[in-house]
Image (spheres, coloured by chain):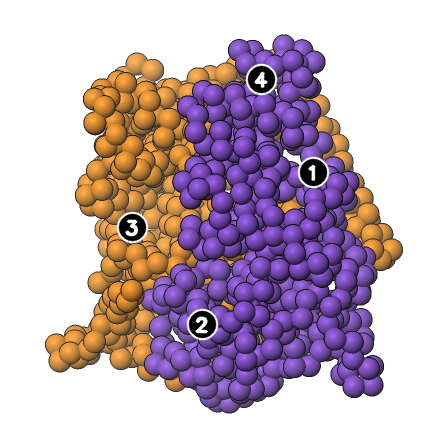
Chain colours: A orange, B purple
Amino acid sequence: MVQPLFPSRRRVLDLESQTASRWVDVVLLCFIAAVAYGVIRAAARWSEPLSPGTTIDLSPSHLPLYAGLSTMRMAIAYIISLTFSLAYARIAVASRNAERVMIPLLDILQSIPILSFMPGVVLGLVALFPGRTLGLELAAILLIFTSQAWNLAFSFHQSLRTIPPELGEAATVCQLGFWRRFTRLELPSGVIALIANSMMSWAGGWFFLMASEQFTIGPKSLRLPGLGSYLATAAEQDDVRAITLGLLTLIAIIVLLDHVLWRPLVAWSDRFKLEQSSAAEVAHSTVLDFLRASRLIEWTGARLVMPAWRRLDAVLSHAGPPRLPVAFDFVTRSRARRLARYVMLGVVVLVVLWGAFAAAREVAGISVRQWGDVGVGAAATFLRTTIALALGAAWTIPLGVAIGTNPRWARRMQPIVQVVASIPATAVFPVLLLALLALPGGLNIAAVALMLLGTQWYVLFNVIAGAMSIPSELKEAAVNYHVTGWRRWRTLILPAIFPYLVTGMLTATGGAWNASIIAEYVSFGGRTVRTVGLGSLIAGAAERGDFPLLLAATLVMAAVVIAVNRLIWRRLYVLAESRYRLQ
Amino acid sequence: MTTLTDPQPDSIRAEALLSAERVGKYYGDDRAPVLEDVSVSLHPGEFVALLGPSGSGKSTLLRILAGLMSPSYGQVLVHGTPLHGANVQVAIVFQSFALFPWLTVLQNVELGLLATELPEQERRERAVRAIDLIGLDGFEEAFPKELSGGMKQRVGFARALVVQPEVLFMDEPFSALDVLTAENLRQELRELWASRSIPTQAVLMVTHNIEEAVSLADRILVFGANPGRIRIELKGLPAAERARKGPARAQLVEAIYRIMTNPGEDASAIYEAGKPTPKRPRRRRQQSIPDVSIDDLTGFVQYLAGMGGKAVLHELGRDLQMRGDDLLAISEATDLLGLATVQGRIIALTEMGARFAEVELDEEKALFRERVLERVALMKKIVGDLAAADSHTLEADGVLSELAHSFSKEEARRQFETVVDWGRYAELFTYDDVDGELRLDEEHRIAT
């Protein structure tokens, strides 16, 4: 049987494309010039003296500048997150013992509300670079980093663990050293998952944009010029026009990034698919096609990038001792190694104990009444997050199933849903507040709405994926045997999407609790509005500089999130895996 | 282990390129032996086949010799020096091709040369020449997903040959290909090896296909399972007779079939006797349930009954297009249950087997139930334990961990799944996958 030819991945250049390619080069040059200018200006800014009351100018002319600065911060944080994830996952895979510590640690880090640690971190960094904006910028980048890094690390770790063993053996047999093995085998195996998770990470980053560009610690209020602080200032000053313009700019950037960055990457990453069949549906991106047609890129690629890469590759391949890769299961029996392992374990234990002591000492000063407040707050926030998750599930499940079971809709809706999901709810929050604060119990409703907006996308995406995975034969059998309506839902659809739903809810839970810190305590229209809740306690304590209460409330929140994850979602997930897997 | 090669005086015999000395491998804490006390050596000019059923450890031995795994005891010698880490003199062709999906054919082939200090130009030339050698000229820029199975394996060969390895290892290289493509590639390999157009000095091939081993190898090592060990070493056919369907070839194939269908008996006795041996009492090795599903078992018995109750075993395998592995497993299963026996090259239904093929489903199940309780130790034990247990329920994990004492974890799992399949069919017990429990089927309880 003759194998059908895979559709050619490089379009043949015809005359029309020749002209097009010239235009592309011009556009590219302009783009590169703009980015270079932006970076130079930003660098200049960073060494400027820090003025605590940096005023945000709400006039539209400043919007491009602020937007550029915010995007730059996001990009820097993303690069750091990516590097961190690659290193972290790789180290975790290299050693069994390391993995046993590192992966649960990642789990915990994912559940901790980062916003509560921000005051301490900000103060520290500002003190490190006195009088300059650099410290504040680093704090903002750090916050964005913490919202982007964890799922990237999980994803790469998962990819490394699922590399087909024969590919690993082939790499060992070909005597590939560490660097070559990493660049030829391990990194490529993770590309597709990393790209999908990067898109999620950016969405998470935008969510924290407003929180990351503005810090109120005690009496001080520090602000960075950027889109987030623009929106926050506009909300404070009740300036509806500014809010709208800012929101539109944000949406424009997100759509632009989607078209110029993510879609081309997804299309390009098709060659990294592990299943070796020429799939019918290949993602398509006009931007990628244009870039491929660009002669400028071709030239720089061939003349500059590739030779430089080859030289770098050669140097790095020979780095390190020239030993042969050791057999996989070679067990170190040497005394020295074991001793080193015990010492490291001891150090880790000591650090953890010291941390626990220090925390206990801080927390000890809290009165019983305050503990009571924490308890009540936790209960209130728990109620709110549960309502938000329930509401989210209520509308995302039907819609997700509708989209997922209909492949044509799925194809059309998916890019749209992805962009809409990237728009951070925190940007829309001020608008919500305007509308809802007038109503009785206003902030409560607004808080639930924010949690809902921020986390429903996780559930929706997962439900769509779950619905798409229902084999068409099962659907046909249901039709054939007249299994319709509620019975169809009960016997086919709900069991099929159950594992995916649980995964989505797990992610959504952490997000909802994290969002409570922003949602339950807001400064709006010149005044502070708060409600009973753990998030409100944390935000209030941060503002007042009450560190013991801050620490106590944060620990309680982390504990609750971890508990809910372990006791509810993970148990359900295990049930889902064993009983409801579709194979 | 017995050797049936012509003894050569030591002075003429060339030094072994690669050898394993009394090598063994355990898995897990409970020391389930995958390989037991195996010694192999490879000499220049040899094509050696490791032949055996699945679970006999031949792939494990290959990986130990290649330095991908370290043995639990024993050592591997490369030109007389002990091996630590990956074996430089070896290149491997894998069963599932193991091509990197994101690299072109040319880049995949060059992968083997990256570790050498060759300049890029020369690397490219060598890779192109290797691609030409295996007949894929023009496909250098193609990606693996554009290639058929046979072409992918050619790339696998090119990647292995481009480094000019001293020894070429092949791990079931043709078993993932369809029959015609596999035959084509085998022929090309034969020509390549015979014409000495590659500097490789020896070839080691792992296979479960008896015909394949006979048509390619100078020496055939027949493996046994549970534990993995070499049962007998056979001299292969002279090169001229390997491709043709002559009498010498037929005789060797049948001899190997006889050896492999009688796993409990002494291999050299079977080989030397050359005629059907009287049934000797089984050697005391841990009884293992062959990997055969009920469907295959009943279908096979029906088919054999349709052929008049008798057939030449390896012809039957060819007609049913069964893998060597599966054919042996089914003949072992029917022998175990007393439904058929193998005498020499013929497999014949017993009286019980003939009745089994005739009757209706219910009676068929009753017959099976009786047989399986009588002959299969594991089934008897499980039913006995169930009868004695509280509420006649057993935890699956308990049964599994007991099995894991004598077998590797995967093999234990596989045996458990087979015994559950048989037990459910016989209506002896039910199994709840979610709770992990075996429950006695009260209706059909037989006093054991």
The numbered disc on residue B185 is: 2
Identify which amino acid the numbered label 2 is placed on.
Leu
Identify which residue is drawn at 27% across, 22% down.
A488
Residue B372 shown left or right of residue A49 in the figure: right
Query: Which residue shows up at 65% across the image and 49% down it?
Result: B262
Q: Residues within 10 Å of mark 2 (few under 14, many from 20)?
A: some
Of residues B418 and B70, the one drawn nearer to the viewer in this rendering: B418
Name the quarter where the N terminus of chain A is drawn: bottom left
Q: Amino acid at mark 4?
A: Arg
Amino acid bearing label 1: Gln
Residue A182 placement (x, y as % from top left): 55, 64
Q: Residues within 10 Å of mark 1 (few under 14, many from 20)?
A: some
Q: Nearest to the eye among marks 2 and 1: give it.
A: 1
Chain at numbered mark 1: B
Tag 4–tag 1 contact (CB < 8 Å): no
To the question of a shared chain for discs 2 and 1, the answer is yes
Q: Nearer the viewer, mark 3 or mark 2?
A: 2
